[in-house]
Amino acid sequence: MKFVTSLLTDVGKERWESLEAESQHTSVFQTYAWATVLKSVGTESRFVMIQDKGTPLIGLLLSRSSFVARALGGYEVMGGPLVVPDVDESVFSSLVSLLKHVMKKESALYFYWSPSFFFDIDAFLSDQGFSRIPSATFVVDLRPPAEALWGKLEKRARWGVKRAQEMGVTVQEAKDWEDWDQYHNMYIYENYQKRVQPRSMRLHRAIFECLLSEEKVKLFLANHNGKVVAGGLFLVTPHEMLYYENAANPRCLSLQPNNAIQWHAISWAKEQGIRYYDLGGALAASDKRSFLRGVHVFKRQWGGKLYEYSSFALSRLYVFSRALVNEKSLALQLYYALEKLGMIKRSDRL
C-alpha cells in the first residue's frame, strides 16, 4: 500500500489536534500546544505525517537543535508517535524512511528519538540503522483504587507524606504568573547551587502561556507558614501525567515538601481519570556510582513499575557523547561550560 508522507513546518492546529484525539496514546511533547511552546522559545519544529487517502494515520513532532551554527545541528523527538488504532506495520516503515530522508535532505548531524514505551517500534528503527540507547522510566498505573496506590508506595515515601502533613505543609495549584515566577526563582537558585544549567525564564513563561489554558500543565506548590517551600511541574494529557521538574528551598527539606507534592499530584491525576504517571526517566541499570542514583531512588519509591526501553539515534558519535555526558558529572559540567562560552548553542534546555 502506498501512503502520502509529508514533512511540514505546520499542519494546522485543528488537523493535528484531531490526530491527538484519535491517537492510542498522547504525550504532551507530541501536541500542537507543545509546538507552540517550541516556537515561543525560538526552536524550530516540523510535523511528520503519514496519510492514506487524506486520512492521517500517524504523526510525529520534531524539534531542531542547533549547535555552533545553524548547519551543525540535528533533530530531537520526545514521546510519540501519534497513532490511530489498528495501523498496519507498513505505516511505521514509511515513517522511519521519511525520518532518514529528513536527515539527508537537511544535512542534520544526528537524529535522536525517545519514543513512547507504549509502542513497540524497535524493529523498524533498528533495521534502518538507528542505534539503540538504553533508557528507562518509572510509571505508576493510576487505575487501581487510591488505597491500593497508597499501599504500593515504599515505606519512606509514606513516611515523608505523613511527616509533611504533621508539619503543616499544604499543597495548592499555582494559578497566576506571580506564583509561577516565585517558583522559577526558587528553581534557578537550586540549580545554580547544584551547578546544573537550569531551564530559562522564557521557557517557563512559554509553558505557562501555551499550556495552562489548555489544561496541559500543573504547577503544584508546597506551602509552610504562608511561604512557598517547594514546587513540582507536571505535564498532562488525558492519557498520562509526566513529572517534568521540581525545586525546593534547601533549608526546608526536613519538612518533606517534595513528598507532599508527589502524593498530591498522584491523587489529583487519579481523580481526573488519567491512566498513567510517568516519573520522567530513571537509570536503565542500577548503578550505585552514578551521580543520578539519588534521583533514581526518589522516583522508585512512588510505586511505579520500571520500564526499560530503547531510545534511538542516527550518529554513533552522538550516542557516545550522550552516554558520556549522562554517566559522568564532569563531562556534564564541561558541556555546560562550553554552552556558556557560546561554543555550543541551543535555543533552550527543553
Image (cartoon, helix red, strand yellow):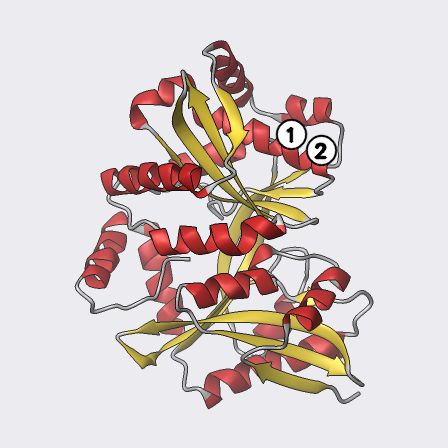
Q: In the rendering, which numbered label is found on residue 139?
A: none
The answer to whether residue 289 of the structure is visible from this angle is no
In this image, 65 relative to 313: left or right? Answer: left
Residue 289 picture location, percent across and down: 33, 40
**Disc 1 vs disc 2: Cβ atoms closer than 8 Å?**
yes
Image height check: is 190 above or below 2? above
Q: Residue at x 61, y 70 (%)?
A: 60
Q: Residue at x 61, y 62 (%)?
A: 31
Image height check: is 313 above or below 254? below
Secondary element at image label 2: helix
Q: Residue at x 41, y 39 (%)?
A: 178
In this image, 243 relative to 320: left or right? Answer: right
User: In terms of image quadrants, where is residue 44?
Assistant: bottom left
Q: Amino acid at mark 1?
A: Ser
Q: Amino acid at mark 2?
A: Glu
Residue 280 picture location, percent across and down: 51, 46
Secondary element at image label 1: helix
Residue 56 picture location, percent across and down: 74, 76
User: In terms of image quadrants, where is residue 245?
Assistant: top left
The answer to whether residue 305 of the structure is visible from this angle is yes
Q: Which residue is mark 2?
A: 271
Task: Name the quadrant of the N terminus.
Answer: bottom right
Q: How many marks?
A: 2
Q: Which residue is mark 1?
A: 267
User: How far apart are the two marked residues, 1 and 2, measured between alpha carbons?
Assistant: 6 Å
Residue 340 picture location, percent across and down: 20, 60
